[in-house]
Image (cartoon, rainbow, N blue to C red):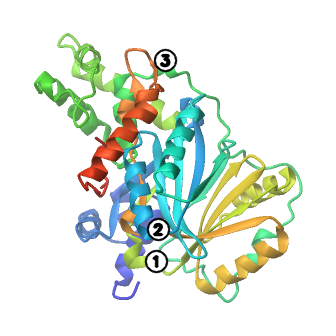
């Protein structure tokens, strides 16, 4: 973080710790004017230091199943083919490059229930085309936890932080909180407005509701031939015409929109954070571990430690049934100590180094077209989930269309 003023670092710290609070509230805490706060935030955005407030969705609440897939490759060129394939697949949630003792790709897919066969066909296609030498697939049990890395907190006092003691905590009594325990919402509750909101708040959760409400109304002024993947999905127009009907008052429309917005944020948002360009601030190594055949009581203990004692470093955990996935961002010295502790406590362990920089780490926005609004269900046919994807991948390779996916792009 060399070269950044104390004021900028304090602004980054407060943005990451309170991502949805008002800029005026931030300004009061920092003792500066609201105009100065806004100007500083705009400077950080223009300089590509921060990239809006991203959010992640709970797939199980939406009637989807999460699968973690780790691809192993023998060449860097293979990774490019894998990334292209993941960019095109409609249900890819995220991807990260892996490096170290093995090279490859860490990916997450959120797919409709009962469609694992289609995902497996897609994975076998990539093996058959030699995009990878092999893959491992894990189904999420639906419990996960995530904390971002504070920018202006290098683990408080590195010489005194006891990382082994943190993960060795023995807890007594009942858990204080339940992590991500929620009931599934029926698929037929989704309205096009819901889906558009899901799409947009995954890349910027600070967009004002009033702005989104007016933006979706503008879709009705576009010619019908603009109803495509980049603007308005097929079949959405009749619903929007009814929602924005001339006999409805602006107040009634906004109140209805507000209700739909809060239905989404209250039910489906799992976590949110400011997107910070770690190229300028990262001083940590990101390691991922898979603890295999972990005992349920040990898994529960680790989730309790994380939920009841906020760590001063970035950590993500995903319950993979009989296994547990953990990603940590720590300074080199502490990462080494953590690796020794993990190896000493868990006999069946795999670990990976993660590339979290630039387009080597992509988190995709919600893909509206995965939901068939007419049939009120997720698109799960072979053409959508496998055959069409394979065709698009092959066409893109033939045309050498290895494109970068930016946060404002829609998949085509």
Mark 1 in CB contact with mark 3 (< 8 angstroms): no
Point out which mark residue 188 bears: 3
Q: Position of residue 278 (x, y in %)?
A: 41, 72
What residue is drawn where x is 45% and y is 49%? 55
Q: Which residue is mark 2?
A: 356
Q: Secondary structure at mark 2?
A: loop
Q: Position of residue 389 (x, y in %)?
A: 39, 39
User: Quick one: 131 or 41, which is closer to the camera?
Assistant: 131
**346 relative to 213 in the view: left or right:** right
Q: CA distance from mark 1 to mark 3?
A: 43 Å
**213 relative to 26 in the view: left or right:** left
Task: Report crowding for label 3: few under 14, some 14 to 19, many 20 or more residues within 10 A (C-alpha).
Answer: few
Quarter holding residue 180? top right
Image position of 250 with respect to 67: above or below = above
Quadrant of the snapshot with the N terminus: bottom left
Q: Position of residue 379 (x, y in %)?
A: 44, 26
Q: Secondary structure at mark 1?
A: loop
* Mark nearer the N terminus (2 vs 3): 3
Quarter holding residue 238? top left
Image position of 55 with respect to 333: above or below = above
- Residue 258 visible in the displayed image: no
Q: Secondary structure at mark 3?
A: helix
Q: CA distance from mark 2 to mark 1?
A: 10 Å
* Mark nearer the N terminus (2 vs 1): 1
Q: Which residue is mark 1?
A: 282
Mark 2 in CB contact with mark 1 (< 8 angstroms): yes
Point out which mark residue 202 bears: none
Image position of 287 with respect to 410: above or below = below
């Amino acid at each position: 973080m060399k070269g950044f003023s104390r004021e900028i670092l304090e602004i980054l710290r407060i943005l990451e710790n309170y991502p949805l609070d008002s800029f005026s509230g931030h300004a009061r805490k920092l003792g500066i004017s609201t105009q100065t706060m806004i100007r500083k935030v705009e400077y950080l955005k223009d300089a590509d230091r921060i990239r809006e407030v991203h959010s992640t969705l709970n797939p199980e609440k939406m009637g989807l199943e999460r699968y973690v897939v780790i691809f192993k490759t023998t060449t860097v060129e293979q990774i490019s083919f894998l990334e292209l394939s993941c960019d095109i697949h409609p249900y890819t949630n995220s991807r990260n490059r892996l490096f170290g003792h093995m090279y490859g790709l860490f990916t997450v897919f959120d797919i409709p229930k009962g469609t694992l066969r289609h995902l497996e066909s897609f994975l076998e296609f990539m093996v058959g085309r030699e995009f990878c030498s092999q893959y491992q697939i894990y189904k999420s049990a639906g419990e996960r936890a995530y904390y971002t890395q504070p920018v202006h907190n290098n683990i408080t006092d590195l010489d005194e932080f006891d990382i082994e003691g943190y993960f060795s905590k023995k807890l007594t009594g009942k858990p204080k909180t339940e992590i991500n325990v929620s009931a599934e919402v029926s698929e037929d509750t989704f309205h096009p407005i819901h889906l558009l909101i899901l799409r947009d708040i995954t890349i910027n959760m600070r967009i004002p509701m009033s702005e989104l409400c007016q933006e979706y109304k503008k879709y009705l002024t576009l010619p019908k031939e603009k109803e495509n993947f980049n603007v308005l999905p097929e079949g959405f127009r009749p619903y929007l015409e009814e929602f924005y009907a001339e006999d409805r008052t602006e107040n009634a429309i906004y109140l209805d929109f507000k209700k739909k917005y809060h239905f989404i944020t209250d039910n489906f948002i799992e976590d949110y954070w400011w997107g910070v360009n770690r190229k300028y601030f990262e001083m940590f190594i990101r390691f991922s571990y898979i603890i295999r055949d972990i005992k349920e009581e040990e898994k529960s203990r680790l989730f309790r430690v994380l939920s009841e004692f906020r760590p001063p470093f970035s950590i993500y955990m995903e319950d993979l049934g009989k296994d547990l996935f953990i990603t940590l961002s720590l300074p080199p010295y502490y990462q080494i100590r953590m690796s020794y502790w993990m190896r000493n406590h868990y006999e069946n362990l795999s670990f990976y180094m993660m590339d979290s920089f630039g387009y080597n780490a992509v988190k995709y926005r919600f893909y509206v077209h995965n939901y068939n609004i007419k049939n009120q269900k997720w698109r799960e046919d072979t053409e959508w989930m496998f055959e069409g994807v394979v065709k698009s991948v092959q066409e893109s390779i033939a045309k050498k269309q290895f494109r970068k996916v930016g946060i404002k792009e829609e998949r085509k």
